[in-house]
Amino acid sequence: MRITPMKKIREVLELHVKMKLSARKTQSIVGVPRSTVLDYASRFVFK
């Protein structure tokens, strides 16, 4: 398991959650796996 810097986590959340970009588009911009994008988004969004 790799540790992702907080800056990348913030960038993922801003692009995917706030700007509503797809997980694939966010993945290509930030450079993290698609599953990581979806994982961060699911942890951030309150259910």
Image: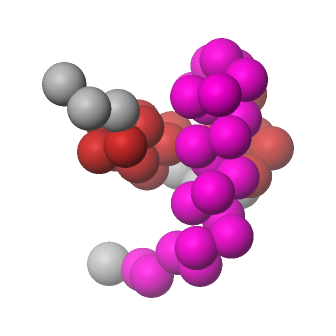
Q: Is residue 37 visible?
A: yes
Residue farthest front in this picture: 46
Position above or below: 34 against 31:
above
At horizontal 63% and vertical 57% (from top left) the residue drawn is 10
**Which quadrant is the N terminus positioned in?**
bottom left
Q: Nearer the viewer, residue 25 or 46?
A: 46
- Vertical position of residue 47 compared to residue 33: above or below: above
Magenta segment range? 2-23
Rendered residue at 58%/73% (across/down):
6
Q: How is the image coloured?
A: secondary structure
Residue 26 shows in this picture: no
Residue 41 rendering spot, x and y as whole percentages: 42, 37
Q: Give the tally of numbered discs.
A: 0
In magenta stretch: residue 11: yes
The single residue placed furthest to the left in the displayed view is 47
Residue depicted at x 19% and y 25%: 47
31 versus 21 height, above or below: below
How far across and how far down the image is residue 21, in percent? 69, 20
Camera-side residue of 44 and 22? 44
Q: Main secondary structure of the magenta part?
A: helix
Q: Is residue 26 magenta?
A: no
Q: Which of the 4 quarters of the picture holds residue 2? A: bottom left
Q: Is residue 15 left or right of residue 1?
A: right
Residue 13's quadrant in the figure?
Answer: top right
Q: Position of residue 45 (x, y in %)?
A: 35, 33
Image height check: is 36 above or below 2? above
